[in-house]
Amino acid sequence: MDVGPSVQETLALVYRLQTIDSELVHIIGEIEAARAHLKGKEDGLSELSLRIDAEKRELLGLSREKKDKEEELRTNEHIISENKKKNKELKHSREIQAYMAEMEFRRDEVERLQDEILRLMETIETLEGTQEKRAAEIATYREELETAKTDLLERQKEREGEIADLEREKASLMENFPETLLDQYKRLKVSHKNGLVVSRIQGETCGVCRMVLPPRTMTEVKKRQKIVPCLHCQRWLYLEGEIEKGEKRTV
Ligand SMILES: [Zn+2]
């Protein structure tokens, strides 16, 4: 592409625009990462709160169950002691048999209920221990969440001015851009990997693909008569240096 004698100036402009775009992407990415970190902490905290609530409900249910079993146990023990009183009044063998069967059933019930109450007490104790640990866990989480929040706010505040400056510079740069060149830049920015359109030459190496440029390409670039693309990665090669006579640096 022939852009006349001010090719160096044009490339300098495009290179600066590209640098601004990269910086903006970097800054925004940094803020996004801080936001994602905060979101992760928020999700973690609400998940933990839900778990704590579920465990509390479970604990409540177990305590109720224990109370019911204890009531049942008392009832059985009461029946046993009442039956014992009536024992002496029994005469017929059928009555005595029925009494024995009833007493055996009640004693089994008492044993079963005592076992169940014991098991419930163990489970309740374990859950209560977990609840204590959860309280410490959630306190840590809240602290981390606050840190993440402060971090995000600070980062945003810090970077706000930087973003505004870059955006302002970008807007004024784009005003000076020939429209066709801007269109081309935008198109290549999307199609090229990393959004890089211009490659700054380092020594005799392409700054983007790191391939050594052939002497013929270097000569072409140094003539500064047209935009020379890298043979390997197609980026516009930009050799940083003084602006040639007759050219004005606008950036
Ligand atoms: Zn290259």
Image (cartoon, grey):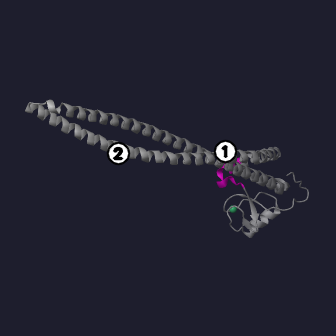
State the residue in front, 171 or 100. 100
Residue drawn at 39 percent across, 35 percent down = 64
From the viewer's perspective, tell me whether residue 71 is left or right of residue 81.
Answer: right
Region in magenta: 186-197
Residue drawn at 14 percent across, 29 percent down = 89
Q: Residues within 10 Å of mark 2 (few under 14, many from 20)?
A: few
Write down the quadrant of residue 219 in the picture.
bottom right
Q: Which mark is residue 119?
A: 2
**Which SS does the magenta portion mostly show?**
helix
Alpha carbon separation for disc pair 1 and 2: 44 Å
Image coordinates of residue 202 in percent, x first then y, are: 75, 66
Is residue 191 at least partly visible in the picture? yes
State the residue in front, 114 or 192. 114
Q: Amino acid at mark 2?
A: Arg
Taking the image as four quarters, which one is ligand 1 found in?
Answer: bottom right
Pick out the residue farthest to the left.
93
Residue drawn at 81 percent across, 61 percent down = 240
Residue drawn at 49 percent across, 39 percent down = 53
Q: From what the image shows, is residue 219 above or below residue 121? A: below
Write down the quadrant of residue 73 in the picture.
top left
Q: Which mark is residue 149?
A: 1
Is residue 177 at least partly visible in the picture? no
